[in-house]
Image (cartoon, coloured by chain):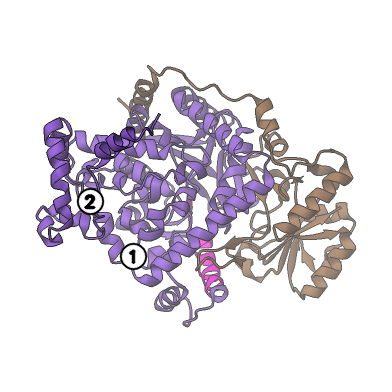
Chain colours: A brown, B purple
Amino acid sequence: MSSREEIFKRVAAATKGLEDRTELPAIEELLEKRSKLVPEANDESTLVEAFRIRWQEANGVLLDGVAELEVFLKEKGVGRGYADPELLVELGVTGESLGAEDRFLRSEVDSYGFGITRASLGIAETGTIVLKDCETSNRLAALAPWIHVAVLRKRSLVASLYDALGRLGNDPSNIFVTGPSKTADIEGILIEGVHGPGIQVCLLV
Amino acid sequence: MSLRQDIDLFSEEIAEETRKSVYSASKIKTEKRFDILAKDFEDADAVRKLASRIKQHTLENLPTYLKQAEEAMVANGVTVHWAKDGDEANAIVLEIMRRRKARKVVKSKSMVSEETHLVPFLEKHGMEAVETDLGEYIVQIDGDMPSHIVTPIIHKNRKQIGRSFEREGLGPYTEDPETLTAMARSFLRQKYLEADVGITGANFVVAESGRIALVTNEGNARFSMAATKTHIAMVGIEKLVPRDVDLSVMLSLLARSSTGQRLTVYTQFISGARAKSQEEGPEEMHVIFLDNGRSEVLASNCREILRCIRCGACMNICPVYRQTSGHAYRSVYPGPVGAVLSPLLNKSGYAPLADLPKASSLCGACQEVCPVDIPIPDLLVKLRHKGKDEGAERGAIATPGFGVWAKAASSPSLWKAGLVAGGAMNWIPRALLDIDPSARAWQGSRDLPRFEGGDFRAWLAERKKQGGGQ
């Protein structure tokens, strides 16, 4: 008997005679028990306001529009960076104006000060952005540089975690990001920027 | 054999410094958990009960959901493997690596791979295997054991870590946590980029979509899956939930219960190799479903323990864990959940860990904070019975004999005689009372109160005479 068959046989035997089985809770109950942080209205400005508060509570940096991004990058004094070239076209800016290149070289991964890629969704309830693999031009560029800038369209905001989970679709990798990379492993002291970005920016457009 | 329980002996040897850091870190996390759940939910208790029902339903119908998950994964292009025990799971990893001509592995934190001792196994077979969670990496270079399932080096301080990093050549000695973290960042970054395979666990597996959900704060699982060409996820068969949206409940509770965060920084939902348009990431994905004793737990009267989502809230609040720290539990899973799960999953049987279910005052705090409402105190009592029934020596250590009491309590004349004789306890020297070893162990840390018994009947008769007592 293969291990697969044996495991299936064992779990079948273990659950066979069970009485009073627990019902799977209905979807309505999942919705009803969501947190108080889910905005009551679903219009764009309500969602933007709620998202802004939660995102900043999670220590994310929020920027409004490309002009703010240009100022931010200058202030941080970052040198070389990367930006998804298609995204820049949509934003109507050139790579030169931001100091961004259109290729992310794996062999020089530590030489990039920032990476700019797309966020597919934002969640108002938790202050979270969603990076889908199909819309992220390069996984390393969204992760390795100290500053990651995720570009999120206001119309891509959803109210709740529940809503976002209903939109995972068939993308092989949905990454929910809530703030910068962090650890408290050493004596419980919070340190940001462990393996991923130490500064996580969301550029709302 | 000593009459002290092993867990007591371990805790006696803990340095005062360690005890303090474990105590304060656990306490802070418990307080953060209470605050954020109360702040964010109308009725957090009702959410715990809801999560509990989702997991209990899944476990009771596990054959159906396992089959559904397997089918969905295969449809997603994932290769699914099944392992009865740890050895088989490790062998599958090695086989995949050999086929891929891989030599180097980066590993994210996964309790299940701790169970199977995967890293030492791979090293023995000539592979380089590096733990990438900061805490787990420190545990690895120190040849230590994790003492908490979420914060594995809760028992270490920055000075010890500074010395370890200096010894391993990560940089000059420092005690600054920020510098230490930066040193690990730059060292491990090279390891990711050189590695062929990324190994992760999974916090949840969704049956309907075949997705695994994986949470990390540091981003190590993300890096493993951005830099390597092969992804292997090792998963316990109990990790399932039926629907993607069920995770809205589970994830709402997991990080809040664990670290007091609303969500863990990175929550990844992975259902296969990288997208076609993607430049970096795995070309293939493997999932290894591991039984390793879980199907036996499912068949037992302690199956509720399989609802556990490994948040660590029960250990953070547990008065015993706070005093003993995790190593005293001598197994992968410490604290209240470990006191139930570890002896049940133990490879060499229940008996060697039969003392763990006794290391509890049954105060019930663990169940109150559990995000899936596991009746841990009830399960501990069931396991105490199991220890007795199976004659496990460690299940009986330091329990005073009740034989004499039972005999006296079943005979009215002996009982009365005992009540009269009881007064003698007040003038017999203590040293003479400690003749029985179990009495000695019991009294070593307790004072005997003054005997004031035997007067109830006399008191009642007097009270009736005076016309009192209805």
Residue at point 9% right, 55% down? Answer: B435
Residue B185 within the magenta-colored segment of the rendering: yes
Horizontal placement of B56 versus B434: left or right?
Answer: right
Residue with the most extreme front position? B466
Residue B213 appears in the picture as rendered = yes
Quadrant for residue B253, please give it.
Answer: top right
Residue at point 50% right, 42% down? Answer: B368
Horizontal placement of B119 versus A95: left or right?
Answer: left
Instruction: Name the mark on residue B451.
Output: 2
Q: Amino acid at mark 1?
A: Gly
User: To which chain does the residue with label 2 belong?
Assistant: B
Q: Position of residue A155 (x, y in %)?
A: 85, 43
Q: Is residue B121 above or below residue B431?
A: above
Q: What SS does tag 1 mark?
A: loop
Whichever of callouts 2 and 1 sits on the residue coming sooner in the sequence is 1
Residue at point 70% right, 31% down? Answer: A32
Q: Amino acid at mark 2?
A: Phe
User: To which chain does the residue with label 1 belong?
Assistant: B
The residue that mark 1 highlights is B143
Q: Is residue B365 above or below residue A89?
A: above
Q: Which span is picked out in magenta?
A: B180-200
Q: Is residue A189 above or below residue B356?
A: below
Marks 2 and 1, Cα distance to the nearest angstrom?
53 Å
Q: Is residue A196 above or below residue B170?
A: above
